[in-house]
Amino acid sequence: MDKLRITGGRPLNGEVTISGAKNAALPEICAALLTADPVHLNNVPRLRDVATMRLLLDNMGVQTETHGERGGMSFVAPDSLNPEAPYELVKTMRASVLVLGPLLARFGRAKVSLPGGCAIGSRPVDQHIKGLQAMGAEIVVEHGYMVAQLPQGRSRLKGARIATDMVTVTGTENFLMAAALAEGETVLENAAQEPEIPDLAEMLIAMGAKIEGHGTSRIHIQGVDRLHGCTHQVVADRIEAGTFLCAVAATGGDVVLRHGRADHLDAVIDKLRDAGAQIEAGDGFIRVRASGRLKAQSFRTTEYPGFPTDMQAQFMALNCIATGTSKVTETIFENRFMHVNELVRLGAKIQTDGKVAVIEGIDRLQGATVMATDLRASASLVIAGLVAEGETIVDRIYHLDRGYDQMEAKLRGIGADIERIK
Ligand code: UD1
């Protein structure tokens, strides 16, 4: 199993290119299931989750290809394929549930494994099932699979009003894709507004879908009976950009993030500025400068445009070595503090009580061997390792490879002392 060896204490300086967003690329790959025409994506990040999603589609009978260095990928989903997502693939990536909506909409049936346990909480899919049932799908859960089909005599899903009990990102994406090919109008109330949703909606519109209100909490979709192919550029990864911003804020230095979208990171950038980092942004770049210890910042995670749960662990690493005491409240996922015990191994002073962590900033962390437990937790340990005294080994970095495109190479490029050991 690969590990990272990091020797802390170096400031970061230079330029990093931000990759396409994992959380946009995954639903957009699934959107290729909605048409028999070729679908081309550019700027797809090179990640394990993308490889898993590709394998899932390959397995169904979709022709998939990658092109060139710039993250080009093409898909052709023929009229006849095997609409099944097996447990072996789904268990490694919860986002596999994103095939459910498009398969039902185009093929009228789907068999998708339940995602099963997940390190950051139970993460059920009840809202996905309820919403698709409201659109006329018959879904039963048997032998660990969601088995979905249309009622006899129906060939399409029907439009519906769907109001989910909570804001769900992949749920909203599943409904958008299903509704694009449904009969009549669908209204999504309480829709997620994360930038990956409008990015997917724009792709669907380029395929011929009729969608309004994406980027707000109410989305109207007028179903069409056929979608066509398209070429789409995956939006920049706001969480990757946010992770680099926190890394530079922690180590000090001066870094420009090329292709970074500051307008998708307002909540994080506001906190970093309050902490004392200098951040400038323009068309397609974000520049961050920092020196010395910053001021610790309290925050609570909420849905977009609030502070993203996917940035909680990385900002906490920064708080560990900032001046003052901060309080971090995680409201989206239960059990998303698994990085805390590992940060404590590096000397951090953190107390948790349910969804709240209280962090007392200290002067410096000390290198140690730590274990990555999930994707964003791994990123937080890398940031901690970059500022810790001496050597830090981050074990189980396959979590990091799920969601970061060549993170250690990018960090090395801006001066970090970091290497992958096999
Ligand atoms: C997506 C992101 C993930 C991010 C999360 C929250 C992708 C591929 N993943 O995950 O990186 O951390 O949004 O911003 O885009 N819930 C239910 N029932 C459901 C669906 C969700 O109870 O059917 C709950 C979840 O357990 C969680 C909350 O709703 O507590 C939000 O989850 P959701 O937005 O669905 O997360 P994902 O879409 O899985």
Image: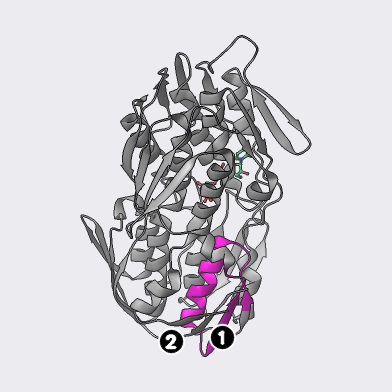
Residue to which mark 1 is pinned: 367
In the rendered image, residue 375 lying in the magenta stretch gets the answer yes
Within 10 Å of disc 1 (Cα), the crowding (few <14, some 14-19, many 20+) is many
Q: Quadrant of residue 329?
A: bottom right
Q: Nearer the viewer, residue 336 or 176?
A: 176
The count of marks equals 2
Residue at the spot x=49%, y=78% of the render? 321
Which residue is the extreme one toward the bottom?
390
The x and y percentages for residue 164 are 56, 30
Q: Which residue lies at the image location 63% right of the left edge and 49% below the top edge?
A: 89
Question: Coloring scheme of the render?
Answer: one colour
**Neighbour tally class for label 2: few under 14, some 14-19, many 20 plus, Cα within 10 Å:** some
Which span is picked out in magenta? Answer: 370-397
For badge 2, the amino acid type reads Gly
Residue type, mark 1 in image:
Gly
Residue 273 location in percent, x, y? 33, 65
First in residue order: circle 1 vs circle 2? 2
Q: Secondary structure at mark 2?
A: loop
Residue 20 vertical placement versus 417 (above, below) = above
| In the rendered image, the vertical position of residue 417 relative to residue 409, given as above or below | below
Q: Position of residue 77 (x, y in %)?
A: 47, 35
Q: Quadrant of residue 375?
A: bottom right
Check disc 2 and report the residue beneath it.
Answer: 9
Out of 415 and 107, give the one closest to the viewer. 107
In this rendering, does residue 167 appear at all?
no
Indicate the position of residue 13 as horizontal and vertical percent values: 30, 78
